[in-house]
Image (tube, coloured by chain):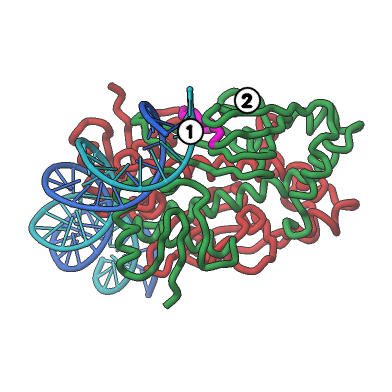
Chain colours: A green, B red, C blue, D cyan
Amino acid sequence: MITDFNKETFIKNFEHSCEKVQKKHFKKNEIITSYIAKREQFCILLSGSADLVRYDFNGNKTIVEHFSPNDIFGEVFYVVSTNNELFVEAKKNCDVLFYTYNDIKTQCKSNCAFHNILSEALPELILSKVTDLNMRLELLTKRSIREKLIGYFSLLSARSFSKTFTLPFSLTDLADYLSIDRSAMMRELKLLKDDRIIEKKGNTITLISH
Amino acid sequence: MITDFNKETFIKNFEHSCEKVQKKHFKKNEIITSYIAKREQFCILLSGSADLVRYDFNGNKTIVEHFSPNDIFGEVFYVVSTNNELFVEAKKNCDVLFYTYNDIKTQCKSNCAFHNILSEALPELILSKVTDLNMRLELLTKRSIREKLIGYFSLLSARSFSKTFTLPFSLTDLADYLSIDRSAMMRELKLLKDDRIIEKKGNTITLISH
DNA sequence: AAGTTTTTGTTGCTTTTGCAACAGAAAAAC
DNA sequence: GTTTTTCTGTTGCAAAAGCAACAAAAACTT
């Protein structure tokens, strides 16, 4: 069911078709939204990049998700379970569309093409989130820093159809994404280079086949 | 939207209402299903208990999810992303109902009450999976064994509305669920007892408030 | 273009975690 | 009810990861 659904086309065609939508601009480092109240917000990132982050009581930062243009996010996809607050932070200047899920389900249903289609597509949109979460889960259950790095690099390699690819964020953020210490990660990256498993020029990585 | 939806009632009322459903029995340690092919299977556990598990190439086992009666699972909720195979293993004798998502979406839609309602409820069902996944993610991003244990115990405590609760699986399985070494976990459990943070009698834990 | 901030790269030291191995307890199978 | 298997609890040792701190490079500001 996911295969015959094209998110990009969907977003392109309908991004401006409903009056209830709000478009906002954010500067780098601004907070786009926080997942606390039950506002059931649904957002589409039009340009820029942003991270869904969580800070625990020790101040450890975790990047839960990383968003690029056309990615969707919001409380609809992330039923908040615990006490930790979640923020979506702009990493670059961003344009974002805001909807609410309630509107999708009720108010607009009979008279707005956008919401009709969104309502239809919602299971697929949510399922694509589930895929992302599962992928992330698989990375986090890996037992060593080395395995996490190789797992993540393999994924990026598969996505870009190339052994060489550029990281979507800084090495500092990569550590927060993989839930590991940055300096330990740097050490392991060096070992991966020494062992001729990867090549690394800045944030561009090449997986070496053996 | 999740609040006004009752999964138990839903399952009770409709579990036998469609001809396309298959009911099967499994003995302890049998494999109920594996998430490989795109069969888009959708299952309901009627009795017993089961785990969704993954084995990596080092033989490390990860318990991705733990299922109790009335829990739902299947490929519909877990779009397989990588090469690792996933299995649902019966931990006790189990009764399971099998559907396929395609039927839900197409064949039955116009003439079967069960599939109509399932189709309506699917977004909510999937969202409840997302909640579980996010909870799990939050546990796995914790940086130490101690934090993972306390995090998980807090969760069980909140769910049972009590400071005292029984683990849903063995300590061996708990380690696989938290992605940590069992002996290291046992050591940490002992330290938690010594530090008077928990009490422990077998698989029953009490969180001590301070 | 100069100054400021963030990121990268590195290292010594400490703490945490994993591994291996084993004995006793408990549970399951026969 | 006895045997077999799994689970719990423990430990010494080795390996991995975290912490802290710093310098150089790069990226942003103004």
Circle 2 SS class: loop
The amino acid beneath tag 1 is: Arg
Quadrant the C terminus of chain A occupies:
bottom left
Q: Amino acid at mark 2?
A: Lys
**Residue B2, percent from left and from top:** 66, 33
**Number of numbered discs on residues:** 2
Q: Is residue B163 at all visible to an observer of this figure?
A: no
Few, some or many C-alpha atoms within 10 Å of disc 1 (few <14, some 14-19, many ≥20)?
few
Of A192 and B189, the residue lying toward us? A192
Q: Which residue is mark 2?
A: A38
Measured in 3D between alpha carbons, the distance from the residue under mark 2 to the one under mark 1, in whole angstroms, is 20 Å
**Residue B168 badge:** none
| Image disc number at residue B159 | 1
* Callout 2–callout 1 Cβ contact below 8 Å: no
Query: Is B70 left or right of B151, judged from the image as shown?
Result: right
| Residue A82 magenta | yes
Q: Is residue A21 above or below residue A147?
A: above
Magenta range: A81-91
* Residue B150 appears left or right of B13: left
Numbered disc 1: secondary structure: helix
Q: Which residue occupies 64% across, 63% down? A: B24
